[in-house]
Structure formats: structure tokens, C-alpha cells
Amino acid sequence: VTGVQTCALPIYNCVVQATKAADADYLDATDQVTITVAKASRTITALTNTVDGTTVTYGDSTSIALSIAAGSLGTGSVTYIKISGDCTVVGTTATITGYTNNCVVQATKAADADYLDATDQVTITVAKASQAISFGPLTDKHVGDGDFELTATADSGLTVTYDSSTQIGRAHV
């Protein structure tokens, strides 16, 4: 058999022709086969954030890192988008903007000449941030003293409300 051809990638339809010369018993013969080479699939694995585990605190930023399965790199670009939650995504950084919803980020590696596109998602659990309340100076008070103002502030900037659990005596709040 002569005329065997090997196709170099990336060729997605390769025609191979084989020819057998005539001899004393047989006529010559030729046949062709078309080999179709499909794009390879790839898997994006271990889309993670750079903090310990996948929990961050409200107000934190976390960088999103992408790892592609070995042998499936290709040349397609990687993009990140917010799917849902209290966050924004710019480039490779997700910034937490609230604590009521977890942040779901999707990475997509675009298709190229050899590989199909691939996506993966990561859910970043958002925990509430801590805050501290500070009271202004308080002087000692005695029975019969008049009403006085309480001043307290929260380092979060949120409004402080007052409540009393006093069951004996009198408290005006």
C-alpha cells in the first residue's frame, strides 16, 4: 500500500488515500477515508478563592484564582463573572459588598482552535463582620437624679438603639 498520509493538527478534516498497485492477480485499487478531528474537551478544576476555605467576612476582598486540568490548557482567555450574591467581580478580584447572600463567581476559559470552552463556579460564603459599641463617658447616678443622655457609637457606622432590662426601679430609655 502506498500513499498513506499523516495529518498534522490542527486540521479538522483530514483525507487519507491508500493505493494498491495492480499485480498479476488483482487490478489496482484506491480508497479514501476522511478523518474528522473534534476539539478536545477540557475541565476547569479547583476554581478557588485565596482565603482559607471559601468563607470571607463582609468588607473583605478575595482574589479568584483559576487552575486548568493538566494537558488541557489551550490559548482561550479566562473571564470571571458574578452569577449571584453580594459581590462585584473586576478582573480576578471579587469584592464582598454585603452579607445577606453568598457570592457565586463563574470562570470561563474560552474555546480556541483545539479545545472547547469550559466553565466552573465557586460559592464564597459571606459572614457578617464584627462591630464594637463604645459608650461616651458616664458619671455615677443616684436615685432622684434627672434624666440624662446616653451616647454610644458603633464602629460600623450603624445606628445604636437602647433598651433596658431593668425590672426594679425606673429607667427611661
Image (cartoon, rainbow, N blue to C red):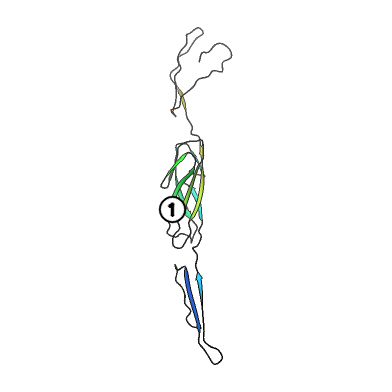
**Residue 102, position in %: x, y?**
51, 40
Q: Residue at x 43, y 51 (%)?
A: 79
**Residue 82, position in %: x, y?**
47, 44
Q: Residue at x 50, y 72 (%)?
A: 34
Viewer-side residue, 46 vs 41 = 41
**Residue 76, position in %: x, y?**
43, 57
Mark 1, secondary structure of its residue: strand
Q: Residue furthest left?
A: 91
Mark 1 surroundings within 10 Å by alpha-carbon count, few (fewer than 14), some (14 through 19), many (20 or more): some
**Residue 74, position in %: x, y?**
44, 60
Question: Which residue position holds label 1?
Answer: 78
Q: Give the total of numbered labels.
A: 1
Viewer-side residue, 68 vs 87 = 87
Asked if 40 appears above or below 143 in the picture, the reply is below
Viewer-side residue, 95 vs 115 = 115
Q: Residue at x 50, y 71 (%)?
A: 35
Kind of residue indicated by mark 1 = Val
Q: Residue furthest bottom?
A: 24
Q: Residue furthest top?
A: 144
Asked if 172 appears above or below 92 in the picture, the reply is above
Asked if 101 appears above or below 163 in the picture, the reply is below
